[in-house]
């Protein structure tokens, strides 16, 4: 099974990426930052089994018992595992991420009813912020930054300025098709510029292999192409699904989970006429169109 291949990679002294190949639907990455007697965990996992495996990895590394869990955004593959870190862990997120977690609940489990989710429940963050929040622990500085709506309306990136390591959440997913149905194309492009300006050396995306800043370029190229497909499709009177079916994926055909194109086009279409970023769309209805485009349920190996 794919889960045998999840692994820890030390990307800087005491800073680990927890990578779950192949990075497809619900196979997210996490981070483990050691800081004195504390471990700062960046995101959890989708299923109870995967979250427990992540916790084992954290416990095997951490010198002490304190745990801070950062949720980069509200999606269940990054948050459902909060519970396994127990009642003593401090869970942190952007304030609107907490709101969206509470409203969305376990809806993700309904999209893939055959996945063995285990005993998952929504454990909401006990600490929220807006703008930015800096954690100081064990001589280390860890910045939580909200740089604008992108993959969702309230993404957090985790930035270690000394080590120049950036955990992007799903704003960047190397090797995978970006996904902005619940976020914004235009906002993502702006946020990518801000991420570039940080000048990270190591980029740990929310899914996919470890990367460097070249991952920003790849994400931007896709989003610019997406805007072009949407503008041309709308001008021809197509629907987003029709545009997805008739366009040539070109260099993006090799990215994982290409059916996200349909959802992405819905968002890009919406932004042609509406200046608001990340306003709500009919996610379940659009997911149905993604199933239609793909010919079956998207592949989830969580
Ligand atoms: Zn996500």
Image (cartoon, helix red, strand yellow):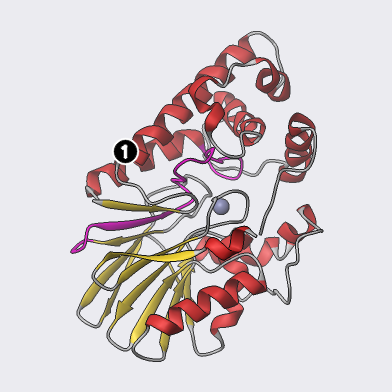
**Element on which disc 1 rests:** helix
Quadrant housing residue 117: bottom right
Quadrant of image for the C terminus: bottom right
Tally of numbered tags: 1
Specify the segment rendered in magenta: 161-184
Q: Is residue 227 above or below residue 77?
A: above
Q: Position of residue 211 (x, y in %)?
A: 35, 47
Nearest to the observer: residue 259 or residue 190:
259
Is residue 42 left or right of 176 when viewed as pictured? left
Q: Position of residue 299 (x, y in %)?
A: 70, 46
Q: Position of residue 37 (x, y in %)?
A: 32, 89
Q: Does the Cβ of the disc 1 residue fall within 8 Å of ligand 1?
A: no
In this figure, which residue is indicated by the disc labeled 1?
214
| Residue 33 seen in the current view | yes
Is residue 20 left or right of 246 when viewed as pictured? left
Residue at 63% of width from left, 36% of height from top? 260
Residue at 63% of width from left, 62% of height from top? 76
- Please tell me whether residue 165 belongs to the stretch shown in magenta: yes
Quadrant of image for the N terminus: bottom right
Nearest to the observer: residue 253 or residue 270:
253
Q: Is residue 255 above or below residue 229?
A: below
Residue at 51% of width from left, 79% of height from top? 55
Is residue 187 left or right of 111 when viewed as pictured? left
Per the picture, the main secondary structure of the magenta-coloured stretch is: loop
Nearest to the observer: residue 2 or residue 20:
2
Q: Position of residue 133 (x, y in %)?
A: 33, 68
């Amino acid at each position: 099974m794919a889960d045998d291949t999840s692994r820890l990679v030390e990307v800087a002294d005491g800073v680990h990426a927890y990578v779950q190949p192949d990075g497809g639907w619900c196979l997210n990455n996490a981070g483990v930052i050691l800081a004195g007697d504390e471990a700062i965990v960046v995101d959890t996992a989708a299923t109870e089994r995967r979250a427990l495996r992540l916790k084992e990895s954290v416990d095997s590394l951490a010198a002490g018992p304190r745990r801070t869990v950062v949720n980069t955004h509200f999606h269940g593959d990054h948050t459902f595992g909060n519970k396994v870190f127990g009642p003593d862990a401090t869970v942190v997120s952007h304030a609107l991420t907490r709101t969206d977690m509470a409203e969305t609940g376990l809806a993700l489990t309904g999209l893939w009813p055959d996945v063995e989710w285990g005993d998952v429940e929504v454990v909401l963050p006990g600490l929220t912020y807006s703008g930015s929040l800096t954690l100081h622990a064990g001589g280390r500085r860890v910045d939580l930054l909200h740089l604008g709506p992108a993959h969702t309306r309230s993404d957090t990136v985790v930035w270690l300025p000394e080590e120049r390591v950036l955990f992007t959440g799903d704003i960047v997913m190397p090797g995978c098709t970006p996904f902005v149905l619940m976020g914004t194309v235009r906002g993502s492009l702006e946020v990518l510029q801000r991420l570039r300006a940080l000048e990270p050396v190591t980029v740990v995306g929310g899914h996919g292999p470890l990367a460097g800043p070249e991952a920003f370029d790849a994400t931007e190229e896709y989003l610019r192409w997406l805007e072009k497909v949407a503008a041309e499709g709308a001008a021809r009177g197509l629907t987003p699904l029709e545009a997805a079916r008739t366009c040539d994926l070109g260099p993006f055909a090799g990215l994982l989970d290409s059916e996200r194109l349909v959802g992405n086009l819905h968002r890009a279409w919406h932004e042609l006429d509406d200046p608001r970023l990340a306003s709500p769309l009919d996610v379940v209805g659009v997911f149905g169109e993604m199933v239609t485009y793909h010919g079956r349920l998207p592949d989830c190996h969580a």
